């Protein structure tokens, strides 16, 4: 039985039951695809459900504020996805509806080749093959392809192969089938080869190369970045500021954040006019991993009866209102330590 036919037969009885598969609504499909970028399905599902409940149509999401969207996204990480989501919703509304071509879908903020193919095939039956981590893995192992998947040559080779295997009249089912196949059977670690309907013709299984494929070139060295957070508690208030554009967590809020470097904390406090601040160290060297860097953060608490002067951009809020602001997961850990 050919590769594609086998996948479709397997999918009929083994495909995952996911709520966004119960509809062809492009909004619901697009929302799921954006949420599931760099997020596991089980983690992303409740976010999709919350977004659909709060903003059941693209027009309602477009009418929301960026702060509202970031607050609802809190905990998922990679916050540029939330900002792109909001921008794309406004693009759709401004255009009077969803683009119905792959090229048109790619014009939406945050929608690349994979997401455009997923939305296009599932919502509009467009014959475009998806290529994501699951697809790379399945194709590399089955066909024994050692071309690195994170090179220009690799991307072209796998994209062409994926498109050649696509049954044009069943694009939606096939794309979902190969993604589920990679997520359920052909997993990164300990694939379930004994249960695989493609086992007899799989190149990697035949040659013992399952663990070696797909090939991925090593990324650039991950750099460390040190942060010092000071949570100020004064008369039931605390201080926040909104992170600027061009850095991590753009548009999210955080307490006072210092990158003291060689200056040291005492010198930084003196520069701020806080020479007499009595700080309590809550947690030290809290590790938080991002895509291209590792953050190491110290958490300090300053309880004072007198509201100190704040650096430019910071403002006072009632402590009980902090839940109204979108904050990074690292800051959530700080708040947990403060409680």
Image: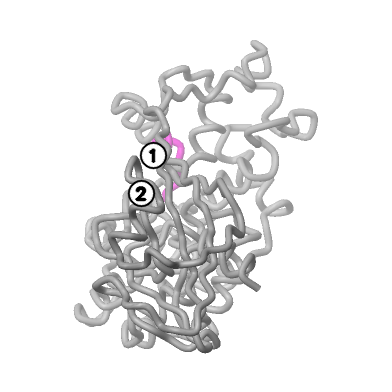
Quadrant including the C terminus: bottom right
Q: Is residue 164 magenta?
A: yes
Residue 111, percent across and down?
Answer: 32, 58
Separation (CA) of disc 2 from disc 1: 51 Å
Q: Which numbered circle lies on residue 289?
A: none
Crowd class of label 1 (few under 14; some 14 to 19; many from 20; radius 10 Å): some
Q: Residue at x 54, y 40 (%)?
A: 134
Contact (Cβ within 8 Å) of mark 2 with mark 1: no
Q: Is residue 205 magenta?
A: no
Which is more N-terminal, label 1 or label 2? 1
Viewer-nearest residue: 285 or 251? 285
Residue 140 in the figure: left or right of residue 149: right
- Quadrant housing residue 220: top left
Quadrant including the N terminus: top right
- In the rendered image, which residue does mark 2 sit on? 260
- Quadrant housing residue 90: bottom left
Residue 101, percent across and down?
Answer: 27, 61
Viewer-nearest residue: 8 or 43? 43
Viewer-nearest residue: 76 or 157? 76
Query: Where are the magenta residues, as a range?
Result: 162-168
Residue 54, percent across and down?
Answer: 50, 86
Q: Residue at x 36, y 26 (%)?
A: 154
Element marked by disc 1: helix
Element marked by disc 2: loop
Residue 14, percent across and down?
Answer: 72, 51
Viewer-nearest residue: 148 or 73? 73
Residue 308 in the figure: left or right of residue 77: left
- In the rendered image, which residue does mark 1 sit on? 163
Task: Name the main secondary structure of what is drawn in magenta.
Answer: helix
């Amino acid at each position: 039985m050919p590769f594609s036919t086998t996948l479709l037969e397997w999918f009929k009885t083994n495909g995952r039951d996911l709520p966004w598969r119960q509809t062809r609504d492009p909004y619901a499909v697009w929302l799921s695809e954006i949420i599931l970028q760099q997020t596991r399905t089980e983690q992303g599902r409740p976010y999709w459900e919350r977004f659909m409940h709060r903003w059941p149509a693209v027009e309602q999401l477009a009418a929301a504020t960026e702060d509202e969207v970031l607050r609802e996204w809190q905990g998922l990480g990679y916050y540029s996805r939330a900002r792109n989501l909001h921008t794309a919703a406004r693009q759709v509304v401004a255009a009077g509806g969803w683009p119905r071509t792959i090229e048109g879908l790619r014009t939406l903020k945050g929608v690349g080749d994979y997401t455009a193919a997923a939305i296009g095939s599932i919502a509009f039956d467009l014959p475009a093959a998806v290529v994501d981590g699951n697809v790379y893995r399945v194709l590399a192992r089955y066909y024994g392809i050692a071309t690195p998947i994170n090179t220009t040559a690799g991307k072209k080779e796998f994209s062409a192969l994926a498109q050649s295997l696509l049954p044009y009249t069943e694009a939606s089912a096939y794309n979902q089938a190969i993604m589920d196949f990679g997520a359920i059977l052909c997993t990164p670690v300990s694939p379930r080869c004994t249960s695989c309907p493609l086992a007899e013709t799989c190149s990697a299984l035949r040659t013992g190369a399952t663990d070696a494929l797909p090939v991925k070139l090593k990324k650039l060295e991950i750099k460390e970045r040190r942060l010092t957070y000071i949570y100020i508690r004064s008369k039931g208030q605390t201080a926040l500021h909104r992170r600027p554009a061009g850095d991590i967590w753009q548009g999210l809020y955080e307490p006072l954040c210092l990158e003291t470097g060689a200056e040291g904390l005492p010198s930084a406090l003196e520069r701020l006019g806080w020479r007499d601040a009595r700080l309590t160290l809550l947690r030290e060297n809290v590790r938080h991993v991002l895509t291209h860097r590792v953050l190491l953060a110290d958490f300090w608490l300053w309880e004072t009866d007198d509201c100190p002067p704040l650096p430019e951009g910071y403002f006072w809020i009632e402590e009980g209102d902090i839940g109204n602001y979108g904050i990074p997961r690292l800051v959530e850990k700080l708040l947990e330590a403060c409680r």
